[in-house]
Image: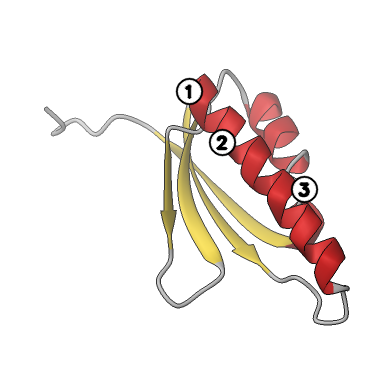
Amino acid sequence: MLFLVHMIVNIPRDLPEEQANEIKLREKNYSQDLQRSGKWPHIWRVVGEYANYSIFDVESNDELHTLLSQLPLFPFMEIKVTPLAKHPSAI
C-alpha cells in the first residue's frame, strides 16, 4: 500500500539544543533505516520549511501508523496521510 505523507516539524524553541540535536540524529538514523528497507522509498524537503513530503510503501494502515509513531520527532510533528492508488492513465 502506498501513502503520501506530509510531515511538518515544530520543535519547541525552549527545548535544549543538545537534546534537539540528539533527537534529530536518532530521527536521521531511523528514517535512513526505513529508506534502506524499502518502506520509505521517497522523501522530499519542502523548500523554506521544516517539512517534507514522503512516500511510504507498507503492508497496512497499522504498519504505517507504527512506523510514523516511532519517529523520534513524532511528538513535534503535524502529519497528514493520503492513501494512494494507481491512476488509470499511468504507464
Do the residues under discs 3 and 1 have CB atoms within 8 angstroms? no
Label 2: which secondary element: helix
Q: Amino acid at mark 2?
A: Gln
Q: Who comes first in sequence, dot 3 or dot 1?
A: 1
Location of mark 3 (residue): 72
| 45 w.r.t. 70: above or below | below
* Residue 48 in picture, x, y percent from top left: 45, 78
Q: For marks 1 and 2, give the CA distance.
A: 10 Å
**In the displayed structure image, the side of residue 36 where residue 70 appears, left or right:** right
Q: Who comes first in sequence, dot 2 or dot 3?
A: 2
| 69 w.r.t. 16: above or below | above
The front one of 5 and 26 is 26
Q: Residues within 10 Å of mark 1 (few under 14, many from 20)?
A: few
Residue at image location 77% in from the left, 38% down from the top: 70
Do the residues under discs 2 and 3 have CB atoms within 8 angstroms? no
Location of mark 2 (residue): 32
* Residue 33 in picture, x, y percent from top left: 60, 29
Q: Residues within 10 Å of mark 3 (few under 14, many from 20)?
A: some
**In the displayed structure image, the side of residue 49 where residue 19 appears, left or right:** right
**In the displayed structure image, the side of residue 30 where residue 59 appears, left or right:** left
Q: For marks 2 and 3, give the CA distance.
A: 13 Å
